[in-house]
Image (spheres, helix red, strand yellow):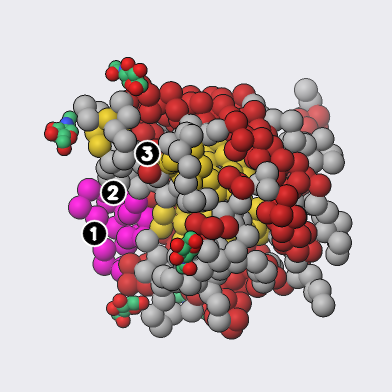
Amino acid sequence: MSYSEILSFVQFIHYFTIIIFLTFNITNVLSIYEVGVDYHAFGTNFTETAFLTQYHISNVRSIVLVQLQGIADRGANFVTLDIWFGSEPGKITDEHWLATFPMSAQETTNLNQYAADVASIQSKIDDHRLHLNIALFWLGIADYKIGNLTEGFGSDYLNASEFTARIEKTTDCIITAISNIRCSDGTLLVQTVYLEAEVMIGAKPNQDWFISTHYPRFLNQITVAGFTPAIYFLVDAREEYILDKDYIDPQYPALNGHRCMYWVYRSLNFLKIHQLPFPKRIDFSCYIDRNTSTYANLTYHILNDADAALSVLDAPKSYGIAETYYFIDDTQRKEFGQAFALEALSNPRLSHIRFWTTPDAGGKGIHIAYPFAIEDFLPPLKKISIN
Ligand SMILES: *[C@@H]1O[C@H](CO)[C@@H](O)[C@H](O)[C@H]1NC(C)=O
Ligand SMILES: *[C@@H]1O[C@H](CO)[C@@H](O)[C@H](O)[C@H]1NC(C)=O
Ligand SMILES: *[C@@H]1O[C@H](CO)[C@@H](O)[C@H](O)[C@H]1NC(C)=O
Ligand SMILES: *[C@@H]1O[C@H](CO)[C@@H](O)[C@H](O)[C@H]1NC(C)=O
Ligand SMILES: *[C@@H]1O[C@H](CO)[C@@H](O)[C@H](O)[C@H]1NC(C)=O
């Protein structure tokens, strides 16, 4: 190449890089901030109104269909179905919130019907559709925090191989229930399936066993089926923790000054040690308890703490709020919701939020049910007004 050819080649590369750079930034600016609901019950009394186990009852299904329509009309982008496993198959119980372990044929059919119903909903305001995520919880006979390897796990002390077989069967039932449900554009309706909520390795007995034993197969099966496997974490979001700038971690210097990341860091570090991949987006429960700061300041601080501490482990600077408060006071809720929305507008690192409902989403004993003021959590530009 002559000198001038080299020069124009260099210029070409230069412009090409600028174009790539611009495209990348535009994509970033337009990146989605999705707002949704942890929706699993049609009323405030969780034990009576959790709907998955009762979805074959036509009255339950009709109520849920009406609520889903309202949730979409009010601007939600998705719903996340939380399923608690933990009752013995075949045992009659009025604990409607507890699905059997492993998942039953009826519950699998119900999940399939519910997913089809979510896919059928279209907002009457702007025609957008909902997508669905699923989060699995383990209680009762599936509560791995009870027991140990020799005694067995859960309230019935199932031996480890039986326990694992039931986790695998449950995973397979979930996949069966959701694999044939697609959006109108042909993509799968369900996006993320979480194996476990609020992973806090070191805080919860046997969670290290549970994750290292079950997460590898779960990752594989869920991925092969076309969904995104994940777990989510927990940020201890008390103001005095968030603002504890003098915090020194006894084990991990990366956490110095970033105390609210205590359990997220330890849990990601556990994944790293076990050569398990990090979720694509780091999701965490984030119940902010403030004293004197604004929610906006605390939210900004939390995400900066995540960037600073978790990047030491090479975690992606990409976050989702997996659970948070839904305050009953309108002013407080709006300030709270807008703190996240404004953060997302100023920085694409936060791309997902869903608020908790029943039980306790408004604080201890304050159970939240439909209807929900979704708009309080939406960015100002995306606000939809309905009468
Ligand atoms: C919810 O319903 C259950 C079953 O009917 C009942 O035992 C319980 O007291 C109710 N809880 C509340 C908070 O009303
Ligand atoms: C399991 O739990 C039993 C009863 O609490 C205890 O005696 C035993 O030492 C524990 N085994 C292990 C391996 O921790
Ligand atoms: C574990 O429990 C199952 C079901 O009760 C039983 O069939 C199996 O033999 C047990 N396995 C071991 C290793 O104890
Ligand atoms: C902040 O509020 C919590 C309860 O919301 C309280 O326990 C704590 O003592 C307060 N801290 C300060 C420094 O006021
Ligand atoms: C706190 O938020 C206010 C606006 O709400 C902003 O002016 C200020 O810079 C923030 N402070 C910090 C430390 O983020």
Sequence-first tag of 1 and 3? 3
Q: Amino acid at mark 3?
A: Ile
Total numbered circles: 3
Q: Specify which label sits upstream in the sequence, 1 or 2.
A: 2
Residue 141 marker: 3
Please give the residue where the numbered disc 1 appears in the rendered image. Answer: 248
| Tag in front: 1 or 2 | 2
Between the C-alphas of marks 1 and 2, the distance is 19 Å
Q: Is residue 64 visible?
A: yes
Q: Which residues are magenta?
A: 243-263
- Whole-number angstrom distance, CA of label 1 to CA of label 3: 39 Å
Give the image quarter of residue 15. Answer: top right
Q: Nearer the viewer, mark 2 or mark 3?
A: 3
Q: Secondary structure at mark 3?
A: helix
Identify the image quadrant of the C terminus: bottom right
- Residues packed near mark 2 inside 10 Å, few (<14), some (14 to 19) or many (20 plus): few
Other-residue count near label 1 (Cα within 10 Å), few / some / many at <14 / 14–19 / ≥20: some
Q: Amino acid at mark 1?
A: Ile
Q: Residue 354 appears at what percent x and percent y?
A: 59, 58
The residue under the point 37% across, 72% down is 239
Disc ID at residue 203:
2
Question: SS for tag 1?
Answer: loop
